[in-house]
Amino acid sequence: MVVLNPSSMANSKTFLDINVVGFGSYTNNDYVYIQDMTLIHAIGKSSTIGKEIRYDVRRKESRFYNRDFVTGPGATWSKGDHGIGLAFNARSYSGLQHLPAFARPFIEDGVKFNTPYQDINYSASNIKLSSLTFAEIQASYSYIFLKKGKEMFVGGASIKKFYSIAAGAANIYNIDLNVRDSNQISLQTLNMDAMYTPHPKLSSKGGMGLDLGFTYQSLLASCESYKPNTKKSGCRYIPYKYKIGFSIIDIGAVKFKEENIRFAGYELKDVEWMNYSNTKTDTANALNVFEVSEASINEGRVKKPTKVKLPTFISLQFDYNVWGSFIYVNASIIQGIPHGKNKFGLRHANSLSISPRFETKWIDFALPFSLYEYKDPQLGLNMRFGPITIGTDKFLNWVTNQDIYGADIYFYAKIPIFYHPDCKASMKHRNKGKINFKKASNCPILN
């Protein structure tokens, strides 16, 4: 899949894969959950679901992660040693890291109902909150740069042009406070940078991004002259026994025009925030909520507040052909790369997955088992019937009563064109024995 590794286009079973439309959403956290229910039941009770919400108090810190996407018309093309892709996407991410345990009771019930939690000194550091929405045009290229015996080496890259839409971010480097009562908070220390876009709009000054990938394939035959999806190679596909991929995805940042953002940096000491529950935001800059003088708002630690770093991650993939090029097992690791403390950006959630799958020309079926953040288990389901793919990483949450910490669904409609037009005549006469495909490629081959 190009999303995970741009070099994966090479030696594809499909000559041209046209994407018509796709969409998906994934949400997960480790604090708020809906108790003992299926997602289908929860959707049906959406108007009263608040009564079923519970809170997990076992963790010292909490985190939240969400991603949504929509894909428009696009395609991947594979012929010979080359693969090319073009995609039009819109993406949205939100993330919260290191939410301290002391903040959770106030989030649950508000301040005035939490008398036991008032008049206590609290401290926290390195809290990061980010949200980002943008559109993109993505161009991908892969190249088989070496074929030696049964071994194939492929490199690939994707270049992305971004169109920024909206963003909001806050880095709380350090905070010491005391919630005196429902009307007063004493801020002993607050070191924080924050930005947001008050009027979301599409801008072509959104910056650029980059994906890099490498794949090693061990084929089932020695075919150094093999040219995938070409008449020269009998218009056939040579399967691999296994392949190993490595990639770095979403290098870069989405940019916003300076006049389209509001930014504030705070280094406050001994500030009494009075009547905070009735605070009215400044229409010119909603970040000035502490009723402090303009002199107290500085340039902050973030030197380029017009940039929000992408959720960059590295990934290692292993795919093994268990039997007859029909049954495979895939193992993948995704490791989010944190950005510097003095930058606005999103962190991609970590995961480790093992996915057995059954794969044919028109039907795929997979059961991915994954560990969100390497510790929370998820069992998914992926199905493809012809041009339609639907799946989820949280299949059990849809069909069995469980504590629901998140939800996930994705859908794609694609038109696969399996053979190059030059191969039509060859495929037409294949069953008539007029062409010896095995001799043409001099190796085991599949349709």
Image: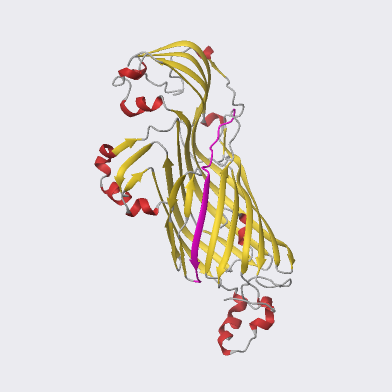
- The quarter holding residue 76 reads bottom right
Give the side of residue 417 with respect to residue 276, left or right: right
| Quadrant into which the C terminus falls | bottom right
Residue found at x 59% / y 40%: 337
| Quadrant into which the N terminus falls | bottom right
- x%, y% of residue 150? 70, 69
Give the side of residue 265 with respect to residue 291, left or right: right
In the rendered structure, which segment of residues is drawn in magenta? 342-361
Decide if residue 308 is in sight here: yes
- x%, y% of residue 236? 61, 75
- The quarter holding residue 419 reads bottom right
Q: In the depicted view, which residue is nearer to us: 130 or 376?
A: 376
When the figure is inspected, residue 230 is found, relative to residue 268, above or below; the finding is: below
Decide if residue 263 is in sight here: no
Give the side of residue 193 with respect to residue 62, left or right: right
Residue found at x 63% / y 56%: 245
When the figure is inspected, residue 30 is found, relative to residue 315, above or below; the finding is: above
